[in-house]
Structures are given as structure tokens and as C-alpha cells.
Image (cartoon, rainbow, N blue to C red):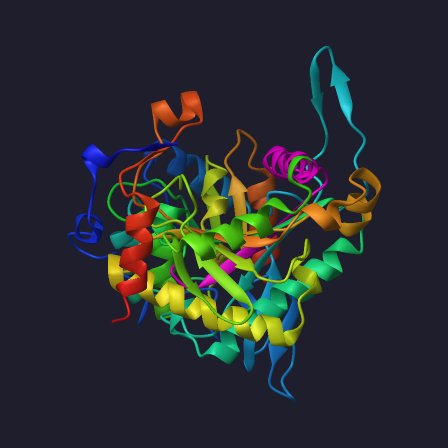
Amino acid sequence: MIIASERSKRPDDFRPASPEKKAGGSVFCPFCMGNESKTPPEVFALRENGTSPDGPGWRVRVVTNKFPALSPGAPPPKSYKGVFQWMPGVGVHEVIIENPDHDKELSDLETDHIQDVLRVYRERIRAIEENFHYQYVQVFKNKGKEAGASLGHPHSQIVATPIVPKRVKEEVYGSERLFRNNKECIFCRTLREETTLNERLVLRNDRFCVITPFASRSPFEMAIYPLRHSPFFTSEGDTELASLARVLKTVLTRLKALLSDPPFNFILHQAPNPTVSQRAWPGIEQYFHWHMEILPVLTKVAGFEWGTGFYINPVPPESAAAYLREAHK
Amino acid sequence: MKKILLVEDEKPLCLLYEEELSAEGYEVTSVHDADSALEALKNKTFDLIITDIRMPGKNGVELIAQIMGLRKDIPIIINTAYQSYKEDFMTWAADAYVVKSSSLTELKAKVRELVKD
């Protein structure tokens, strides 16, 4: 990572000249309440008593992607030709519509509604992981066109893959190696040191901690960690999710205020499907620590980044943390 | 006779679709951009809309959003050369997504399925 202090920028440098317009009001949206017939049938929903699936009255709604990147199916066999290996695109691709109101972003929702969105993440991951051939379940959110969202209505996505992705494997192997060297979870140790140093700490409550990671890839990148060691997001109870919802609301609101509602990606990192993890990485429960990453899209990933894997970040994470701590005052 | 509004900027393709769909017993009105399609919808009722996506001016996805704002009861078929628009959630508003090919078999089958007597 390159922290380009000579290119150093302040939050105002990232404010858009004209904020992205939202397609609300009269323009049609297939995710809005009343348009349920325009989506595939719902696979899960939190809805008012007495209301019917695929009708109005929902609070959070999950549908399969009409044009999925991966489709459900039997465990796929691998094919080989020389050095090349491939397999059919089997998996799960779902869309979580976070609320019925087109213009209410995640940070605008009441904390109990954000908790509901998190509960839905947890329930869908648990359900998908019952099929052990879905080895990894990725929850993510693209907010804003620059971050990859094609529709303004707030939504997240779940993609379950039949293999553990390379980046996740690298994180698992890296944390295993550091556990062997340090005799403790590297994430727990990092949190302890970040709390002591207090240079990159954005906030901390009774159960969660938010930091701007050392050597952040992008300006104002944040990571949210549970203080209690746990490899699986799915093992968090409702009390923990309520606490996480408060933290998410706080940091997303600050990000929005500080940078004029920037596009961002939000990613959940957790250990692979427990059935797979227990077989492939015995002891993973000791060294992997689930977390969330929030990556504002404020710089471009271009030739240098693709070529080297390095990122150039013009905002030192220590400065970003200071701005984010002050943003609510 | 069931009426189809065809939105397609390539005029030779329009002629081909008109011939093929007329032979199937449909009355086809062709327009070559989104604004003309919206105008046609104000003046006439249709049983089905077939729209391209990449067109000069508003694209087909924007057109669908506007049609849905006006009326949601007319079935819509997206007929495009590109798969990539499937990543745009607004295309969910259409009732079918057909990728253009030299054979019109799939398009005709979707038309038959969506235009009910």
C-alpha cells in the first residue's frame, strides 16, 4: 500500500460537484412496495402479520436474482484441459431489499430496522450454508453507481460459491500463519493494539470496534470488528446484532455527512461454510475473526493497482479516523 | 388483431421483425427511439412492447422505467444483442429478456406466451 501524503486530500476534495441524483418519485422501481410482481418470488421476508408473500406489507424482502451470476444446482464436477480447470456456475445469488422506501438508505433507517437487515443476512447465510457444497457465502452491498449499484433502491446481495474464493483463502491462511507465530488471533491482537494506540480508532461500543485499517487501500476505508472473538457472523445473537446496527448507523451517517453521501462497497468477511471450515482448516475457530469492511469509492483502481496489487491512498488512515471521529460534532 | 409496439433503431431489423410478426398475425407499429415509443403509447393501445436497449437518446432501460411509470399492464420484451444489461435491476421490470439471434424462434415464442387472447 502506498500512502501518498504529497497527494494528501481533505474530505472536501472528495465531495462531488453535484451529488448523484436518486431515481425516486415517479420513476418505476422493481424493488419498491407494490411492485413485487416484477421480482422473482421471495425466498424470505420480514413482513406484517396477515400479509401474503409477494405482496405489500414487508419490511425486509429477499428474492433470488432474476439473472443470477450463479444458479442453484448439484455439486459441480471440475473439468480439466491441460493446465486449465473450470466448473459449471453453480451457486446462489439473492438480493436483499432492505426496506420498502426507495429513498431511505441503510443509514436513514431506525436502528431496529438495520438490526432486521442484519438478522436477515444471518438467516439467509445459515439457510444457504445448510448445503455444504456452497462453500462460501458472500454478503455485500454496492451503494451508488460508482460502486456498482444499478438501482438506487437500497439493497444488498448474497452470492454463495461452490469453492472458497482466492482472497478468502489468503485471509484464512494468513491468519493461520500469524496465529502460529503469535499464539493468538491476529485480529484480536490488532484490536488490542489499535485500542491502546488510539490513532485509527473511529469508535467503540460495548461489543464492536471500528477502525480505519493500517495501510488502508482506499480513503476513509473502515473495518468493523466484534470485540468478542468469533469466526462466524452467524453465531452472533440478536443482542450483538442490535449493537452492530447502532455502530453501522453511526459510521454510515458520519461517512455520508463527511463526504456528501459517497458511493461505497460494504463487505462481510467470515470464515467459509462451517462444515467446510471444520474439515479443511481444523482450528479455524481460534484464528479467524469475522468482520465487515466499508470501502468508499473515491479513487480509481487503474493500471498500477491492477499490475502490482498495490493501492495508492491519498488519505492516511490516521487522518481519516480523526475526521470520522469529529464528523458527528 | 393483437397490436405490438416495436422499438428498434436499426431500420432493416425493424422490417424483418415486422414481416415475421405480421406473418404470425400481429399488427406491428415500429418506432426507432424511446421518445417516439412514449408518444405512440399516448395515442394507441398495445398488447405488447418489444424494445431494444442500445438506441440513440434514451436507452431501452430508461424507456421501460418510464413506461412503468405510466402503465404496468402491457407486457414488455427486451430484445437486445447484449447479455450485460441483465446486471441492471431495472430490466427485471420487463417480462422477458431475449438476446438477439439470427433465428427469431425465441422471440416469437415469447410473443406468443405474453400476448394472450
Lateral position of residue A165 relative to residue A87, left or right:
left
Q: In the displayed structure, would residue A253 be above or below residue A50?
A: above
In the picture as drawn, the residue positioned furthest to the front comes out as A196
Q: Between residues B64 and A15, which one lies in front from this camera angle?
A: A15
Lateral position of residue A141 relative to residue A165, left or right:
left
Residue A121 falls inside the magenta stretch: no
Q: Which residue is drawn at 71% across and 63% down?
A: A235
Residue A178 falls inside the magenta stretch: yes
Query: Picture coordinates of residue A9 (x, y %)?
Result: 20, 44
Say which quarter of the image contains residue A122.
bottom right
Lateral position of residue B79 relative to residue B110, left or right:
left
Query: Picture coordinates of residue A157 (x, y %)?
Result: 55, 55
Q: Residue at x 38, y 39 (%)?
A: B14
Q: In the displayed structure, would residue B24 be above or below residue A240?
A: above
Q: Between residues B80 and A53, which one lies in front from this camera angle?
A: A53
In the picture as drawn, the residue positioned furthest to the right comes out as A279
The magenta region covers: A152-180
Q: Between residues A153 and A194, which one lies in front from this camera angle?
A: A194
Q: Between residues B104 and A132, which one lies in front from this camera angle?
A: A132
Residue B73 in sight = no
Say which quarter of the image contains residue A88.
top right
